[in-house]
Image (spheres, rainbow, N blue to C red):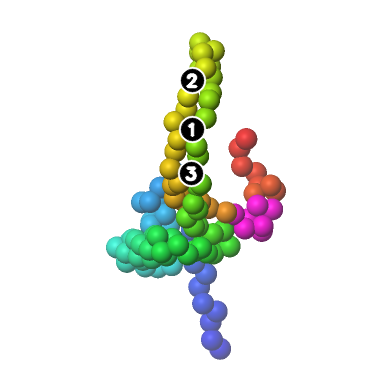
């Protein structure tokens, strides 16, 4: 009669999610060497960054998508100094590229039900 495989002890999620704690958690949970886990995470972030820099919308699992958005140029316009109330001219700004992240619908729904501190 074959024995059932021994159950691994549940790996506790770290209290603070730093790079080192994530690497340690993943290494322990999957029975891997920390060095290998660190390399995999670095490769993952490198490929995500490369995809985003090429202008692609990169999906990050069930969490959401990362991409670059073009913020349009803005012309010069009058404004008011909030401290003195004096009218000033705000200079024009050129179009810029800004990194963006949109969360998936399922992640947003899970976040509303979470027990996170307010």
Residue, disc 1 = 76
**Residue in the foreground of this view, choosing between 89 and 55:** 89
Q: Earlier in the sequence, mark 2 or mark 1?
A: 1
For the stretch drawn in magenta, the main secondary structure is helix
Residue at 51% over, 13% down: 86
Q: Residues within 10 Å of mark 1 (few under 14, many from 20)?
A: few
Q: Residue at x 65, y 44 (%)?
A: 115
- Local crowd at mark 3 within 10 Å, few (<14), some, or many (≥20)? few
Residue 30 in the image, given as x and y percentages of width and height: 43, 67
Query: Could you say which disc has been placed on residue 88 in the image?
Result: 2
- Is residue 88 rendered to the left or right of residue 109? left
Residue occupying the point 48% across, 20% down: 88
Which region of the structure is painted magenta?
Answer: 103-110
Callout 2 secondary element: strand
Residue to which mark 3 is pinned? 73
Which residue occupies the foreground of this view, 104 or 53?
Answer: 53
- Point out the image quarter for the N terminus: bottom right
């Amino acid at each position: 009669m074959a024995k059932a495989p021994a159950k691994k002890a549940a790996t506790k999620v770290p209290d603070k999610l730093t790079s080192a704690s994530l690497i340690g958690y993943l290494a322990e949970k999957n029975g891997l060497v920390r060095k290998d886990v660190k390399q995999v995470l670095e490769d993952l972030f490198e490929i995500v960054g490369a995809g985003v820099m090429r202008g692609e919308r990169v999906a990050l699992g069930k969490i959401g998508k990362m991409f670059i958005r073009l913020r349009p140029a803005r012309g010069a316009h009058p404004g008011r100094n909030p401290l003195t109330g004096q009218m000033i001219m705000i200079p024009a700004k050129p179009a810029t590229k800004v990194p963006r992240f949109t969360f998936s619908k399922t992640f947003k729904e899970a976040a509303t039900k979470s027990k996170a501190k307010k």
